[in-house]
Amino acid sequence: MSKSVEPRFSIGLDYGTNSVRALVVDVSNGDEIASHVAGYPSGEQGILLDRGDPNLARQNPADYIDGMYASLSGALRAARRHPGFAPERVVGIGVDTTGSTPIPVDAQGTPLAFQPKFRENLAAQAWLWKDHTSAAEAAEITDRARRSKEGYLTKCGGVYSSEWYWSKILHCRRSAPAVFRAAHAWVELADFVPAFLTGHTDPHTLPRCICAAGHKAMYHDDWGGLPRPAFLRRLDPGLADVAKRYASRAVPADQVVGGLSADVAAKVGLPAGLPVAVGAFDAHMGAVGAGVKPGTLVKIIGTSTCDITVWPLDKPLADIPGVCGIVPGSVLPGMVGLEAGQSAVGDIFNWFVNHLVPAQYTAAGDPHANLTRAAAELKPGESGLLALDWSNGNRTILVDPLLTGLLIGQTLHTTAPEVYRALIEATAFGALTIIRRFEEYGVEVKEVVNCGGIAEKNPLVLQIYADVCNRPMKVSRSPQTCALGAAIFGAVVGGAYRSVPDAQRKMTGTKRDVVRPRKAAVDVYARLYPLYRQLHDAFGTTAYKDQLANVMKALIAIRGQVRRKSP
Amino acid sequence: MSKSVEPRFSIGLDYGTNSVRALVVDVSNGDEIASHVAGYPSGEQGILLDRGDPNLARQNPADYIDGMYASLSGALRAARRHPGFAPERVVGIGVDTTGSTPIPVDAQGTPLAFQPKFRENLAAQAWLWKDHTSAAEAAEITDRARRSKEGYLTKCGGVYSSEWYWSKILHCRRSAPAVFRAAHAWVELADFVPAFLTGHTDPHTLPRCICAAGHKAMYHDDWGGLPRPAFLRRLDPGLADVAKRYASRAVPADQVVGGLSADVAAKVGLPAGLPVAVGAFDAHMGAVGAGVKPGTLVKIIGTSTCDITVWPLDKPLADIPGVCGIVPGSVLPGMVGLEAGQSAVGDIFNWFVNHLVPAQYTAAGDPHANLTRAAAELKPGESGLLALDWSNGNRTILVDPLLTGLLIGQTLHTTAPEVYRALIEATAFGALTIIRRFEEYGVEVKEVVNCGGIAEKNPLVLQIYADVCNRPMKVSRSPQTCALGAAIFGAVVGGAYRSVPDAQRKMTGTKRDVVRPRKAAVDVYARLYPLYRQLHDAFGTTAYKDQLANVMKALIAIRGQVRRKSP
């Protein structure tokens, strides 16, 4: 009766900040048939901290391997309960990870942390994306890159971050020279995992993912790949050697690193030789899993946001000031990947709930739900409040971590739900500012697809985003778009589809309910947004002749001096 | 053995917003030997409200009379327990009241509200100082006064307020013409009480206190007293008649209105004929009770602040832009009284505690005390926060009720005590701005004496004021300086002293503990204050070429439109 086609499956391995998820997906329609999450056992929720330095965040590389075994085995165990599933019907594996998360390794690609003498050495562990110990080095790299002629910063928003590859390695060189000397190479987590899965033991020939290289290591074809040796040598002679000992060509994630090693295959119960795709960053694969294509902006809304879209390589594209990554092939092969983001979104709402919300909203039930209910009763503009969304700096379009929050318009009658709503609106205005910057430089945003915890859970946030941006807000069908995106690459390297877009058309989708802009709210927000922009430009740029751009920085400078002086 | 001088006493009657206090004072040293407070029974805590109009605030004039009998009788009853006290040893009575609080009266000076047909009519009651129903009329008067040549606004900061005498009467003319027609005159509460005490029944010959006339009714010698009839007629023909039927000359509070009437004297148990002084406003007499003199600024810090100083009439004094009252004789006879103020101080702290403070500070104990304790642990500048103190507009020096609050510098780590401290600091920066404005125009501020509830109760506020203003902060010895100030005028009209300053030298003083500026804090605040001024000038003035002065007003305009549209 029914057309009987043998079902096929692919696997996505999604390395988050605190855990790794394995997801088994039906390649014909993207159905997620099984999933398993394994937390990292080391440190605090998987993060190694230093009580003396709040900027430090490292991870034990052993957790990545143990987590891979636990999550894969668990997911496959669950998948076996699914009719039609069999390990032999898995066609490929894709991997996404946090980043930039470089790991110092020896000449065989083994983390230095596995050597007894480095086991307790924090510098020999993985340097997690949110490690901020390298601020001075980042400033130094930014300064040198600005003075170079190659335009190294044109593809990363004009500022090199302390979260990125070269900053971290240079900081290791300065602060832990023994680790630096012992490291043969520094491998990104997104490359380390496929290397381990396939038993690849030579960093020099390991395919390097374009996502990490392009967005975090200043890799671009315009200057022939990685920064030139002379540039790196001026930062430190050792950096040029680091560049030499790790693949010099970067490739997109539809390429195969190799076949699953017999050892891993046996341990998890999959066929040896299964193709493993080149890795990429979680947000990028999340965008793929949410259906990113030209004209579609994917917003991953969590504690911060990551905004990703793509643009055909054959259409003209200018450098977009303040957009933190413009990298050919980083999201979809054959397209330029564009990454923007807001440094804090959910984090701002959490901050408010944790520090400034009275008992009536916190005593019973979820404070966010209580405040959301009250805030939803308010009309746009009714509170007279306006805020800036800079409590953790501004990633796009100002690329300035030394910006802070601002709230204006409060009276003696201002209530907590009014402030809560103003904070949501502030993040919506920040989102619109990113969309407008894309559009000013010719990158169309015809559709917005949201994913991440807040998009799933808070309809008020999506309604305000729809009203502020005057665009319908769609929500990705999958609640785990990053793992789904990795599984899509697994399907492509496994031959189930000829291209990633082909796979996306079948395997991704959005929920039926679309949050549409409401005319009355759109009209009010159209009057509030210019006021937001006035504050944005006054405090965030030097566009104003009578500058206020000094105010936030002066406050931070005074704060720093006072805190250093304190006993 | 001891030099036996028969002790003498005077009485201060202090009419506040919710109650009246009678204070019996030893004229030789200001010792407060007895006191009694009587609340006003009508309305909500003495205030008649209109559910349909939150701007309306009226009082029942009968409460003033009942309250006088109750407080005077109670205080005298308590005084009799004091050795040496006898009613015959009382030398005089002084009166202070809120204002501008005009009462429509008939030709005998009796409130219209006592007539059966007006008993329930809100327009026929006393129009309490904080009644804001007359905003449109205030704007109209400001507009006409600006276009007149007499400079009517030069002595009141450049803007005529909806809280003041002519605005209220004009609003009655427009909104309750029957009351306006029935009113023979509109007598300020500060004049009504002395008139009642002395049985004075002709408003036309009633001594009019310079304090109310000068600060609220545009009375000034420069233009021959009250505004010219032609000016008033242009506002409304009836206003010129109102001016005619109430004393045309205004006098200071060291003048006698008359002797205590036999009727009142018998009821309270005082000698008939006892001299009763001309009245004045509570804050002005409070300044006298706190020892105001040239070079001394008295700050009365409560929900809002009133800042009062004096300047010799024979020394040159320019009009001071943004200072809301400059009136010869209004505080001390022979001196110019200068009044400034902040629209919200304690109100801002209360707002924060009521709306944005989490349970850990409110669950047990006084939230203000809990927050103050935590805020006192912080160093100046350590939070990176800065705020404007405009949550209820700005009275001095911007004279603009359409300004709102601002908080800048918040991060994901900002705590409630940090915000609380930033709000205290904002009010301190506002206080310094007033002091600087006085000094720019040649009015010296050598000493600051604080009084009022917050000065009494919160040492952190005074310490921050001392550090921000870089001046020692003294605190008035008396906890009820307004009533003491009134008693000082009672002592002077009773012949105990030749002049008010003579009486002040004996009857007033400051506490021994003086809060002194701390060098380290002064240095940090000296760096924060210019940032406050930047925000102040950017949002409060048109000094910035790339203006931000529109932002708060645009938010208020949008807020107003949205709220009017709401169902």
Image (cartoon, coloured by chain):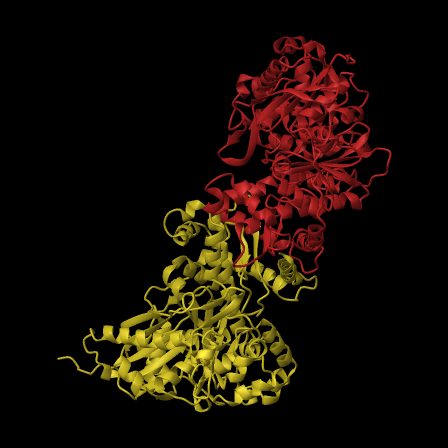
Chain colours: A yellow, B red
Q: Is residue A554 above or below residue A202?
A: above
Residue B515 position in % (x across, y down):
69, 41
Q: Is residue A133 above or below residue B295?
A: below
Q: Is residue A424 above or below residue B455?
A: below
> Residue drawn at (42%, 45%), measured in percent from left and top?
A360
Q: Residue furthest bottom?
A: A205
The image quarter in which residue A334 lies: bottom left
Displayed quadrant of residue B123: top right
In the displayed structure image, the side of residue A407 where residue B294 appears, left or right: right
The quarter in which the N terminus of chain A is drawn is: bottom left
Q: Nearer the viewer, residue B238 or B484?
A: B484
Q: Position of residue A69 (x, y in %)?
A: 32, 77
Near-viewer residue (B326 or B365): B365
State whether residue A396 is above or below residue B47.
below
The reply to whether residue A135 is visible in this rendering is yes
Q: Residue A239's spot in the image, x, y percent?
A: 57, 85
Relative horizontal placement of residue A83, taking residue A504 as reference (left or right)? left
